[in-house]
Amino acid sequence: MEELRRLSIQYYQNTVGIRFFGIKGGAFLFFSTPFLLISLYLDFELHAENLILLPISVCVFLWEKAKKEYDQNLIRHLSFYSHLESKKVSDHKALFLHELTYHVAPSLFETMKIFKEIVETHNKNRNFVLDNIGYHFSRFLYDPESKNRILSLIIYLISLIAVLTVIKPESQYSIYEVIQDIPMDVVKSYLLFSLFFIIFGYFVIVIPVMFVVTYVAVPILLKFSSVAVLSRFFISELNRYSYLEQGLRLG
């Protein structure tokens, strides 16, 4: 586990960091902030959804330029280890992972299987000591082995609610008549509004959250996270680039 922790920290210190944005990428992020604030103001204060597409589009465009600078700086940094001329971040990450883990196994896939087995064995054999208090407390709150029982209880609860809903005094309103009285124009307007809301929510909520998680939350996790968090990230990277380094080394 200690070797896994050491390799995880070393990998993410060399592949994740705000410093890879550089001056130019940082400038793109800085100038994107006013457009993001304007779009939020237009939506939540003025309720002018029809005017929000322009500032949010400019913001996303600047984020894309910042990401491009991030990738270029990362490639420039990893090329010192990989000695590749490739323009793909994945190629450099694959060979860098291979350099880090070659003493564990000759391929990333075998390394992933070894570390995965180490983590599973470690989780199944944690002693009831003070150092593992967080693990045992989480198992006390929720045990994955109880998932089937919890699912059965939820099904019984839904069935009970359905029975209580059906068994009720007769009402003068019919649900079928209410549906028939809804104009088709209202249905079309609702569908168009729903489509616009989904697209709007993706650009205004999902993309900013993904951007923050990728370039802010992960570097913070590197400083304060536990071995378990780093290990999951590291094993997922090994799985992602498995066998890619074989072809690159042969080439």
Image (cartoon, rainbow, N blue to C red):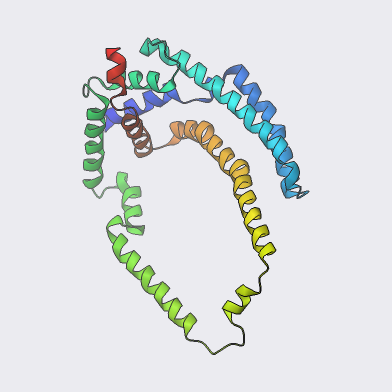
Task: Please give the count of numbered marks on the rendered protein.
Answer: 0
Q: Residue at coordinates 32% horizontally, 25% vertically from top-left? A: 7
Q: Quadrant of the N terminus?
A: top left
Q: Position of residue 248 (x, y in %)?
A: 32, 16
Above or below for 97 versus 186: above
Q: Quadrant of the C terminus?
A: top left
Q: Position of residue 169 (x, y in %)?
A: 54, 90
Could you say which quadrant of the image residue 186 lies in? bottom right
Which residue is most to the bottom? 169
Above or below for 234 versus 190: above
Residue closer to the observer: 80 or 91:
91
Q: Position of residue 173 (x, y in %)?
A: 61, 84
Q: Is residue 239 left or right of residue 61?
A: left
Residue closer to the observer: 151 or 120:
151
Q: Residue at coordinates 47% horizontally, 13% vertically from top-left? A: 76
Above or below for 21 versus 48: above
Could you say which quadrant of the image residue 102 lies in? top left
Residue closer to the observer: 250 or 137:
250
Q: Position of residue 21 (x, y in %)?
A: 56, 21
Q: Residue at coordinates 25% horizontally, 29% vertically from top-left? A: 109
